[in-house]
Amino acid sequence: MDNSATVLCISNWKGGVGKSTIATTMAISLSRKGYKVLCIDLDPSNSLTSALGGSLAQKQTKSIYDVLTAEAFDEASGQYVLDAALQSLGEVDLIGSGEMLAHAEQSLAGPNRLFELADVLSDNQRDGTGKSLREKYDFIVLDTPPEPGVLVYNAYMASDDIIIPTLCEELAVSRMVRTIQEIKEIQASPRFNPSLRIAGVIANRFDRNKKVQNYHLGRIRELEKQGVVPVFNATIRASVVVEDAQTLNKNIFDYGHRRKEGLIGDYAAFVSEYLRLNESKSEVR
């Protein structure tokens, strides 16, 4: 089995397509299959952090902003910044977001500004254990902002796989196409991340009873036939369960709703399909 984590980025350059819900549910699903999972919230909106029950309220807790911008060891506290940022939430670990992340565009400067996250994940001197985050986990799941910028590009440079959630509607599909184009430019450049793989597009909040959504899903599947991008056979249904859970800052597993089983079944099919693409992860540690 491959002993290095697969870094999985959830990205689409459009807001409201369900990136954080996909990231949350996928991370918990992988954990329940026995994999060791770390989540990193790169979105200043904090949606992933909230859904997982993470917190930045404790005085000593750091965020991914601190991990990316500060020295590895904080002399004042006598603590590694990564240790202060890692939150163990039971099923998954988390490095959460925070309000300072909105300043990353200005704070991450210099020639290495797009590779800070890649360095953090591979550096074995970040916490005194002699092991990097890539060595400690099976999967590292990244939630990203909906607009291009230094945080999104850091995620792309650090990732092995990208999953692109989309809604089956005109604007979402057009932004999905733009996202794919940018990723392909990164793949084409030896300076960036030529080994980056688009694992697939996942149709989210899909209502098979709506003709317009079936039309757009057909457009997306046509892109796969043309060799533009892989598309998952699974789809995630539209459900009030997601919105209700988000209102309560819960993930769909922890939210008690009698109609959630079908939605959880969709995610199970999706995650199983993704894992078939990762044969090196077929056994847990």
Image (cartoon, grey):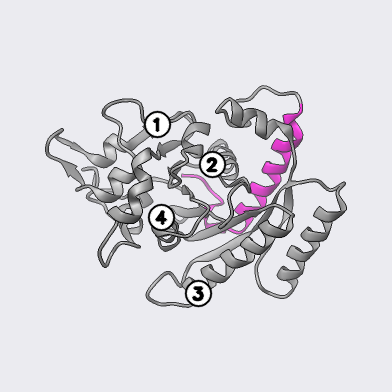
Q: The magenta stretch spans which residues?
A: 259-285
Q: Is residue 269 above or below residue 214?
A: above
Indicate the amino acid at tag 4.
Leu
Mark carried by residue 27: 2
Q: Disc 3 versus disc 2: distance between alpha carbons?
A: 28 Å
Q: CB under 8 Å between callouts 1 and 4? A: no
Q: Is residue 135 above or below residue 173?
A: above
Which of these two is toward me, 172 or 60?
A: 172
Number of numbered discs overlaid on the protein picture: 4
Which of these two is toward me, 248 or 86?
A: 248
Give left or right: position of 154 versus 164.
Answer: left
Q: Disc 1 versus disc 4: distance between alpha carbons?
A: 23 Å
Q: Disc 4 versus disc 3: distance between alpha carbons?
A: 17 Å
Q: Residues within 10 Å of mark 3 (few under 14, many from 20)?
A: few
Q: Residues within 10 Å of mark 4 (few under 14, many from 20)?
A: many
Indicate the amino acid at tag 2.
Ala
Task: Say which residue label 4 marks.
Answer: 151
Q: Of tags 3 and 2, which is closer to the observer?
A: 3
Residue farthest toward the left in the current orientation of the protein: 75
Task: Of the two numbered discs 4 and 3 on the same chain, state the one appearing first in sequence.
Answer: 4
By secondary structure, the bulk of the magenta-drawn segment is best described as: helix
Identified at 75% across, 72% down, the residue is 225
Mark carried by residue 185: 3
Which of these two is toward me, 50 or 33?
A: 50
Give left or right: position of 269 versus 9.
Answer: right
Identified at 34% across, 39% down, the residue is 63
Indicate the amino acid at tag 3.
Glu
Mark carried by residue 88: 1
